[in-house]
Amino acid sequence: MSTESAQAPASTAEAPWPVRTVARKIGDWIHRLGTVWVEGQVTQVSSRPNTQTAFLTLRDPSADVSMSVTCPNWLIREMEPPLREGASVVVHAKPSYFFGRGTISLRADQIRAVGIGELLARIERLKKLLTAEGLFSAQRKRPIPFLPKGVGLITGRASAAERDVLANAQGRWPHVRIKVLNTAVQGSQAVPQVMRALRIFDADPEIDVIVIARGGGSVEDLLPFSDEALCRAVSAAGTPVVSAIGHEPDTPLLDYVADLRCSTPTDAGKRIVPDLREETERVRQMRDRGRRALHGWVDTQARLLNQIRSRPSLADPLGPIQRRQDDVDVHRERARRAMLTLLAKDQAELASSRARLTALGPAATLARGYAVVQFVDAEGNLQVLRSVSEVEAGAQLRVRVGDGAIKAVAEGEQE
């Protein structure tokens, strides 16, 4: 069969393979895998007394993946302790492909229950791994809101843990809003259901804190709360998470990764909301302290005002002001006289300087009959004519006299 399948030509749209050929090829690949050791969690056991074959469903505890397992019925009956749903097992099996139905299952010849010691060792290894990654670091933990506007509670249906959290939280703060999502808290469905509820609450803007609560139980019962996928989901959540699993000695890994670890569900109900009576009493005490402090401050200020009022300076409050006003008037008069004297002196000096400038300036000389002759040099600038050699006949001249200027033309040098 395998030789024929290997030699079959590649399929095309014009020459497709029939279903039997595809099924044979798939079966060939699966049968080549041989026997494997598989670990998982038993979610269903069907072992009837009068049958030769028992049927199991083996599920991956960290993912929504499961496979069917068949084994001899005596293998189930001889297991001690008896195999039950939710148990973790290791199976030695060979994958089988059923040609007629196109399904895959595992044919087991050995089933070993995972003991408590092995479970604890695995949890310890996972704890070291998550610690090395920093998931348990105190710096990652977020503070729990003092008074959350909404609390999301993930717990078992009609469980004592649910009653403890609700009763204690509502007893401390009657108006607290608590939304409850009931999930499986043990067995194979616990992890995916708790993670689904966690995502729902984390996306709800009205939820400020999430509580995951469960009562006490055995190591196997609390095993879902040490699941790696759940721990990483809690670490990645944007809403603070409170862990309230089991009793005081119970410490699943969820306690380490959560933002707040409570010893019991009762303790969680007390720590997620403040106590109304305690807060009312605290407000009353602070109000009394504020009143006493205010009265003390007012009394101190009143005594200080009385002391200030009794000082001699307040007997005649306008007298010092009048004396200062007289001083200001005297100084203002002195300043006025000094300023007038300075201005008169400066005006006399200014008149004297103006007279000297007038006498020395060219305007006075021009007024006496003299003139200033200017010519245009090669660069186009006016220059004072100082020698007849500086201009030639026909040069344009500018003659400035006392009351203005006239233009002239040089005709030549005169003997």
Image (cartoon, grey):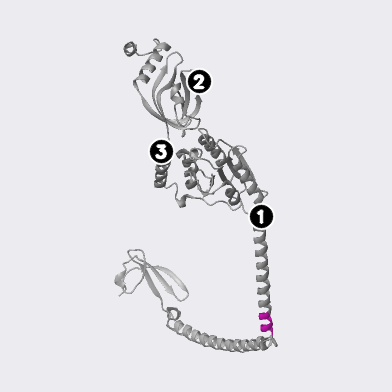
* 23, 108: nearer the viewer: 108
Amino acid residing under circle 2: Pro
* 128, 64: nearer the viewer: 128
Quadrant in which residue 359 is drawn: bottom left
Q: Residues within 10 Å of mark 2 (few under 14, many from 20)?
A: few
Q: Which residue is identified by label 2?
A: 49
Report the mark closest to the observer, 2 or 3: 2
Q: Is residue 211 magenta?
A: no
Give how far apart the Cα atoms at labels 2 and 1 are. 60 Å
- Per the image, label 2 sits on a secondary structure element best described as loop
- Which quadrant holds the C terminus? bottom left
Q: Which residue is identified by label 1?
A: 276
Give how far apart the Cα atoms at labels 2 and 3 are. 31 Å
Q: Which circle's residue, 3 or 1, is located before the other in the chain?
A: 3
Q: Residues within 10 Å of mark 3 (few under 14, many from 20)?
A: few
Amino acid residing under circle 3: Glu
Q: Which residue is identified by label 3?
A: 118
Residue 199 drawn at (x, y percent): 54, 38
Residue bounds of the magenta highlight: 303-309
Q: Is residue 211 left or right of residue 315?
A: left
144 in relation to 383, above or below: above
- Per the image, label 1 sits on a secondary structure element best described as helix
